[in-house]
């Protein structure tokens, strides 16, 4: 899946004639491909989520909720241009939404741009998330995808892991034990600042 996602992002940037070494963001990429008028702001209650793609095979419109903050707008546009890319290629499998979400993260934080930013800013999540205009949660997972570091994002509802396969805990009690012993095990724990109740555990 990672190779498919990265290839998809490469194709999108080529189509947009933009350099993936710069964090252009989802809005700029989408408008470069679909036209300046492709993004339409609609009343908040009009959509079930933050955004939706309307595509008839020739013309595409990305509708986004009014009132989104810059990070949400960036990701929403990136998600829908990712879905557009999949639909255009005839991809119609059950994991389409998951793939569009993965493509969106890689559009917001392209691998070449991440390498440049890491050299300039280091690998601190808050600084990088501000540079790429994304949430700290997305940034933490994307760092793992780009560096190969085993990482877990712990939220109130679910736990997402990235990086090399390892035996992560499978129960709440196991995760509590891991967090309590994190320092002695050499793990790095980061508290997400822009969302409540979220932690990142990273194996350096």
Image: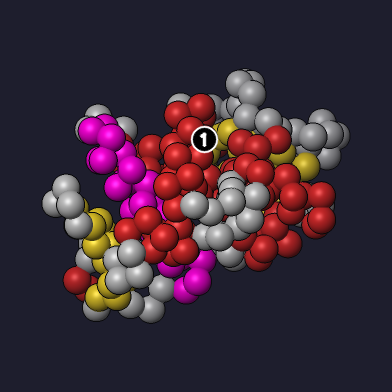
Q: Is residue 131 left or right of residue 196?
A: right
> Of 104 and 194, which appears nearest the observer?
104
> Furthest residue to the left?
56
Q: Is residue 26 left or right of residue 59?
A: right
Residue bearing mark 1: 6
User: Horizontal and vertical percent for residue 46?
Assistant: 19, 71
User: Horizontal and vertical percent for residue 153?
Assistant: 58, 44
User: Within the image, what quadrant is residue 148 found in?
Assistant: top right
In this rendering, the answer to whether 35 lies above or below 116 is below
- What are the residue bounds of the magenta stretch? 69-91
Identity of the residue drawn at 51% across and 27% down? 3
> Of 11 and 129, which appears nearest the observer?
11
Residue 72 inside the magenta-drawn segment: yes
SS for callout 1: helix
Q: Is residue 58 left or right of residue 153?
A: left
Q: Quadrant of the C terminus?
A: top right
Residue 159 inside the magenta-drawn segment: no
User: Within the image, what quadrant is residue 150 found in?
Assistant: top right
Identity of the residue drawn at 24% across and 78% down? 43
User: Horizontal and vertical percent for residue 88?
Assistant: 26, 40
Identity of the residue drawn at 28% across and 62% down? 62
User: Horizontal and vertical percent for residue 157?
Assistant: 44, 47
């Amino acid at each position: 899946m990672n190779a498919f996602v990265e290839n998809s992002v490469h194709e999108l940037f080529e189509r947009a004639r933009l350099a993936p070494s710069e964090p252009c963001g989802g809005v700029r990429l989408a408008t470069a491909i679909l036209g300046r008028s492709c993004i339409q702001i609609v009343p908040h209650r009009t959509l079930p989520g933050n955004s939706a793609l309307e595509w008839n095979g020739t013309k595409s419109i990305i509708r986004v909720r009014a009132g989104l903050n810059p990070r949400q707008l960036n990701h929403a546009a990136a998600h829908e241009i990712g879905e557009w890319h999949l639909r255009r290629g005839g991809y119609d499998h059950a994991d389409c939404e998951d793939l569009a979400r993965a493509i969106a993260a890689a559009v917001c934080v392209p691998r070449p741009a991440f390498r440049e930013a890491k050299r300039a800013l280091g690998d601190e999540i808050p600084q990088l998330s501000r540079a790429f205009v994304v949430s700290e949660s997305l940034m933490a997972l994307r760092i793992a995808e780009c560096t190969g570091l085993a990482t877990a994002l712990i939220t109130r509802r679910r736990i997402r892991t990235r990086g090399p396969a390892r035996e992560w805990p499978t129960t709440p009690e196991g995760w509590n034990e891991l967090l309590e012993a994190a320092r002695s095990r050499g793990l790095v724990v980061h508290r997400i600042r822009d969302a409540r109740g979220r932690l990142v555990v990273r194996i350096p």
